[in-house]
Amino acid sequence: MVKEGKGDKIKHLLASNIPSEVTRMMKTNRNQPVEKSIVRMKHIAYSQHTVKSNGLFTGRKYTSILTVTNGGEWGNWTWIDMCPEGSYATGFSLKVEEYRGASDDTALNGIRLFCSTAEGSKYTVESNVGRYGTWTQITWCPRGALTKFQLKVEPSQGVLDDTAANNVKFYCNNGAIIEGAGMDFGEYGGWSNECKNSAICGIITKQELYQGVVIDDTSLNDVQFFCCE
Ligand SMILES: [Ca+2]
Ligand SMILES: [Ca+2]
């Protein structure tokens, strides 16, 4: 019997795509004809069948950390959340506060990674998340997993209303670039470094804690991602 090499799990995952994972889940997890259940499975595959891994897998070994240089200046680094062993981030969702006009805006409040195993199990990881906004739709890599990112950040507005981080773009290792449904203040900075022979498997956010009613809040300011083989 051939023993699986270290890189085999990720190769399997990178060769897979979302529709085939959903199909595989149905065949193994449900005793229903594929045609009848496919629509329903598409809706529930990433909700009921997605497990939160918050804090449980922080001991997972990572090989490098992805950073950008244009993160916001406020707040502190919070905690690491990692995808379970054998899973990698294949999609993401953002927690975004809509434009509030004359009121205090915070724009991007949180980033949630969706981790997939080659067998089709799904987990979410998200580090610290701000109190404002709602989770947007999930954006998936058409194939493969996330390997680098760019952050859209509004520079300091001085005495005016600051928002810091607004949106995120990821590069998928099949060549696709996917962007979140964030806000539009500020500019994208340069790409982070890239996961080499690996993919994103964890996250830590830099958050400005709630400043109270009269003080300008920014919520999420910066983020780093971890790469695992
Ligand atoms: Ca300000
Ligand atoms: Ca603000």
Image (cartoon, helix red, strand yellow):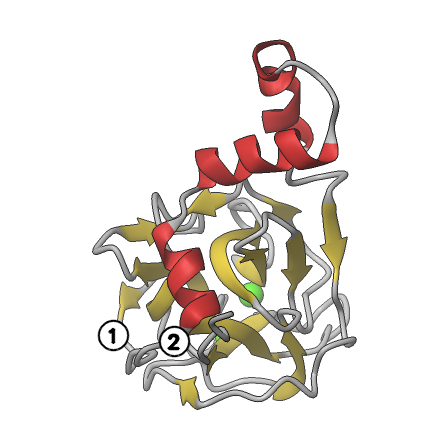
Q: Which residue is mark 1?
A: 191
* Front-most of residues 28 and 215: 28
Amino acid under disc 2: Ser
> Where does the image place residue 81, in percent across and percent down from the top left?
66, 76
Give the structural element (helix, strand or loop) at label 1: loop
Look at the numbered disc 2 and say if its residue's Cβ is closer than 8 Å to ligand 2: no
Q: Residues within 10 Å of mark 2 (few under 14, many from 20)?
A: many
Q: CA distance from mark 1 to mark 2?
A: 17 Å
Q: Is residue 106 visible?
A: no
Residue wearing tag 2: 198
Residue placed at 61% from the left, 70% from the top? 219
Question: Would you place residue 187 above or below residue 195 in this image?
Answer: above
The residue lying toward the viewer, choosing from 168 and 44, is 44
In the image, taking residue 23 as reference, residue 209 lies left or right, namely: right
Q: Toward which corner of the image does residue 76 lie, by quadrant?
A: bottom right
Q: Quadrant of ligand 2?
A: bottom right
Q: Secondary structure at mark 2?
A: loop
Taking the spot 64% from the left edge, 25% from the top edge, the residue there is: 41
Determine contact: label 1, label 2, CB under 8 Å: no
* Residue nearest the viewer, comparing 218 with 79: 79
Determine the residue positioned at 52% across, 87% down. Answer: 62
Which quadrant: the C terminus?
bottom left
As drawn, which residue projects farthest toward the front? 1
> Where in the figure is residue 99, as x and y percent of width and height?
51, 46
Which of marks 2 and 1 precedes in the sequence? Answer: 1
Can residue 17 be seen in this snapshot?
Answer: yes
Q: Position of residue 172 (x, y in %)?
A: 31, 58
Is residue 220 depicted above or below 184 in this figure? below
Residue 163 marker = none
Residue 83 image position (x, y, % from top left): 62, 69
- Report crowding for label 1: few under 14, some 14 to 19, many 20 or more residues within 10 A (C-alpha): some
Report the mark closest to the observer, 1 or 2: 2
